[in-house]
Amino acid sequence: MENKFIVITKTYFEPSEKKKILDLAERSFPIFRKQPGLIAIMSHISHDQTHTMSYLSWKDKHDHEACMVSKDFSDFNQEWEKLLSSGKVRFELQTYDLLGE
C-alpha cells in the first residue's frame, strides 16, 4: 500500500472576510495542483457560510512539507498571513495517515 498523508484544514472567518477567503482559495488550487505528490484536493464551505474545510491527499508527509515551503506560495502566503493577523480569520490544520485501502 502506498503511504498516503491526509491534511484537513478549516478556516473560520467573519462575514466581512468571506470574499477574500474564497478568492484566495480559488487562486491557491492551481498552485496546489502542480505540487509534486499531491493526489487530490477538495474544498467545501459550510452551510452557514462561516468556514471552509479543505481535504488534501498527498503521497507522503514529505510531499506535504515540501509544499508548505514552496516558493510557488510566496505571494499567497503574504496575503494569508495578513488575513490571519487581522484577527478576523482563524486557521486549523490537522494531519492523518490513511488507514487501509
Image (cartoon, rainbow, N blue to C red):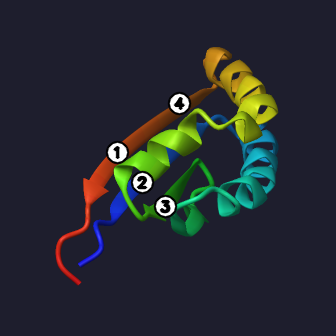
Q: Name the residue under label 4.
A: 90
Asked if residue 23 is positioned above or below residue 92 in the image, the reply reads below
**Circle on res. 56:** 3
Looking at the image, is mark 2 or mark 1 earlier in the sequence?
2
| Residue nearest the viewer, comparing 8 with 4 | 4
CB-based contact (under 8 Å), mark 4 and mark 1: no
Residue 98 is situated, as x and y percent measured from the top left of the image, at 25, 67
Looking at the image, is mark 3 or mark 2 earlier in the sequence?
2
Q: Which amino acid lies under the numbered mark 3 shown in the image of this protein?
A: Leu
Whole-number angstrom distance, CA of label 2 to CA of label 4: 14 Å
Q: In this image, 65 relative to 47: left or right?
A: left
Q: Which amino acid lies under the numbered mark 4 shown in the image of this protein?
A: Arg
Q: Residue at x 59, y 48 (%)?
A: 50
Q: Which amino acid lies under the numbered mark 2 shown in the image of this protein?
A: Ile
Q: Which residue is drawn at 65% across and 34% down?
A: 14
Q: Mark 1 points at which residue?
A: 94
- Residue at the left extreme of this rendering: 100
Q: Which amino acid lies under the numbered mark 1 shown in the image of this protein?
A: Gln
| Residue nearest the viewer, comparing 95 with 38 | 38
Q: Is mark 3 on a helix, strand or loop?
A: strand
CB-based contact (under 8 Å), mark 2 and mark 1: yes
